[in-house]
Image (cartoon, helix red, strand yellow):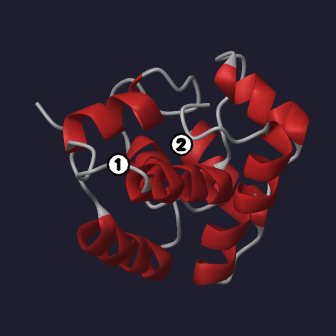
Amino acid sequence: MSLGLEVKQLQDLIGADDNSIIGWELHKIYPAGVHLRRVVEFVDSHQPSPIPRDIMWKLCFSENPCYPKEIRTLGDKIRATRMQNFLSIKQLAQKFGVNESTVAKWELKGSQPRPDMLERIQEFLAAHRSEPPE
């Protein structure tokens, strides 16, 4: 709004529909990974200096009901890392060569990956994980 953009213009820049953008503005829904990445990039590019990490974290994840409130299980770690890297379940499934429902089971139901897959997941977590700011 401070840039004088209409929803349609922002829609074109971010690639989301107007109902989604209005829902984000009203805090009724959170952007999915691909849109969240574009929102972050858009907001960051229109600031005189980068948004501090703790503020960006709060905006993106601390109030997001999909983000794990506590990181206790492997599934929580997978979900948190996926979301922090703006990946969808589909994108992560493609990365590991598994079905989307498999990733969902890892994240939500605590299903344990096969040992060979577990090693790949741990490598992914180590390479991509960023802890929340304290």
Q: For the residue labelled by badge 1, is the local secondary structure a helix, a strand or a loop? A: loop
Inspect the image, locate mark 2, and give the three-letter code of the amino acid beneath it.
Gly
- In percent of width and height, residue 111 lies at 58, 49
Residue beneath disc 1: 47
* Residue 124 or residue 105, whichever sits in front: 124
Query: Along the horizontal axis of the image, is 54 left or right of 118?
Result: left
Q: Residue at x 65, y 32 (%)?
A: 30
Q: Which mark is residue 2?
A: none
* Residue 128 or residue 117, whichever sits in front: 128
Q: Is residue 121 above or below residue 25?
A: below
Residue beneath disc 2: 110
How packed mark 2 is, by other alpha carbons closer than 10 Å (few <14, some 14-19, many 20 or more), is few
| Residue 102 visible to the viewer | no
* Residue 1 or residue 34, whichever sits in front: 1
The CA span between labels 2 and 1 is: 40 Å
Residue 3, located in which quarter of the rendered image?
top right
How packed mark 1 is, by other alpha carbons closer than 10 Å (few <14, some 14-19, many 20 or more), is few
Q: Residue furthest left?
A: 134
Q: Residue at x 20, y 42 (%)?
A: 52
Q: For the residue labelled by badge 2, is the local secondary structure a helix, a strand or a loop? A: loop
Q: Residue at x 70, y 42 (%)?
A: 5
* Residue 51 or residue 31, whichever sits in front: 51
Residue 28, located in which quarter of the rendered image?
top right
Q: Quadrant of the N terminus?
A: top right
Q: Is residue 127 above or below residue 29?
A: below
**Tally of numbered discs:** 2
Q: Are marks 2 and 1 in contact (CB under 8 Å)?
A: no
Query: Along the horizontal axis of the image, is 51 left or right of 97?
Result: left
Inspect the image, locate mark 1, and give the three-letter code of the amino acid beneath it.
Gln
Residue 57, located in which quarter of the rendered image?
top left
